[in-house]
């Protein structure tokens, strides 16, 4: 099973992708997590990405495409994967299509979580509170200014990716405002059980 999750920041992609990872025993590949790991390890990519990520912008396509191309070749991604946070531009979607075609692979589905944007900032604020309460680090981009930039980047660059997949017939749109379990059920149904 090869899946892509689309949706604005705070839509619940990571939560649902983590559940599917358990269910299908395929890795959740979050480009946000991979980039944060690169930032933490202070690799050359991480050092370049940090400033962009903290401001809520998009890291250049060639960097992210390179990371994903390497990652999907790892042995654990052989029988499938869930992409969370990638592709975020039509250019990335086209690069992914080329990568998969070169391996005679295809996507099984693209799941888009639709949410009421007025609710998103509140969700991010809750994530910050949960991180603090749980003793976890708060993401540098979980503040109102960077969040607005992330949402703007989503509208300008990622929303067209939904149209790209809709045209290909692989897009499944799910109501992301329902409770977490109900969203999981709707996704399971869309994937055929
Ligand atoms: P969220 O979906 O909550 O905004 P992510 O963890 O998916 O957060 O991504 C965090 C940041 O990492 C993004 O704002 C962006 O700077 C960078 N990033 C992640 N994935 C990509 C991508 N596919 N292309 C460009 N930048 C990316």
Image (cartoon, helix red, strand yellow):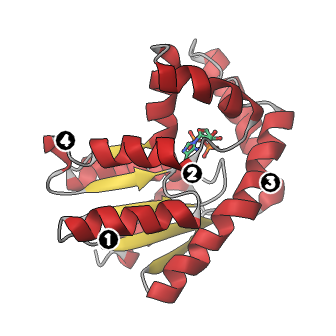
Q: CA distance from mark 3 to mark 4?
A: 33 Å
Mark before the other along the chain sequence, 3 or 4:
4
Mark before the other along the chain sequence, 1 or 4:
4
* Residue that numbered label 2 is attached to: 12
Q: CA distance from mark 2 to mark 1?
A: 21 Å
Q: Is residue 170 above or below residue 185?
A: below
Residue 34: percent from left, percent from top? 43, 33
Front residue of 23 and 76 = 76
* Residue that numbered label 3 is attached to: 152
Q: Is residue 37 left or right of residue 1?
A: right
Residue 155: percent from left, percent from top? 75, 62
Q: Secondary structure at mark 4?
A: loop
Q: Are marks 2 and 4 in contact (CB under 8 Å)?
A: no
* Residue that numbered label 4 is attached to: 74
- Counting labels gives 4
Q: Is residue 58 left or right of residue 18?
A: right
Q: Is residue 91 above or below residue 190?
A: above
Q: Nearer the viewer, mark 2 or mark 1?
A: 1
User: Do we see residue 2 in this rendering?
Assistant: no
* Residue that numbered label 1 is attached to: 107
Front residue of 6 and 134 = 6
Residue name at image x 59 percent, y 44 percent: 60
């Amino acid at each position: 099973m090869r899946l892509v999750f689309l949706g604005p920041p705070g839509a619940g992609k990571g939560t649902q992708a983590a559940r599917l990872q358990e269910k299908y025993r395929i890795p959740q590949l979050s480009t946000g997590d991979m980039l944060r790991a690169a930032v933490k390890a202070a690799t050359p990519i991480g050092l370049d990405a940090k400033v962009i990520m903290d401001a809520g912008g998009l890291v250049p396509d060639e960097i992210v495409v390179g990371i994903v191309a390497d990652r999907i070749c790892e042995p654990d991604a052989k029988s499938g994967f869930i992409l969370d946070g990638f592709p975020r531009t039509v250019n990335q979607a086209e690069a992914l299509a080329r990568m998969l075609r070169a391996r005679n692979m295809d996507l099984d589905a693209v799941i888009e979580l639709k949410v009421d944007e007025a609710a998103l900032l509140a969700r991010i604020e809750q994530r910050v509170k949960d991180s603090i309460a749980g003793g976890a680090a708060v993401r540098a981009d979980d503040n109102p200014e960077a969040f607005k930039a992330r949402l703007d980047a989503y509208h300008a660059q990622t929303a067209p990716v939904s149209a790209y997949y809709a045209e290909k017939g692989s897009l499944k749109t799910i109501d992301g405002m329902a409770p977490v379990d109900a969203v999981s059920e709707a996704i399971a149904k869309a994937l055929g059980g």
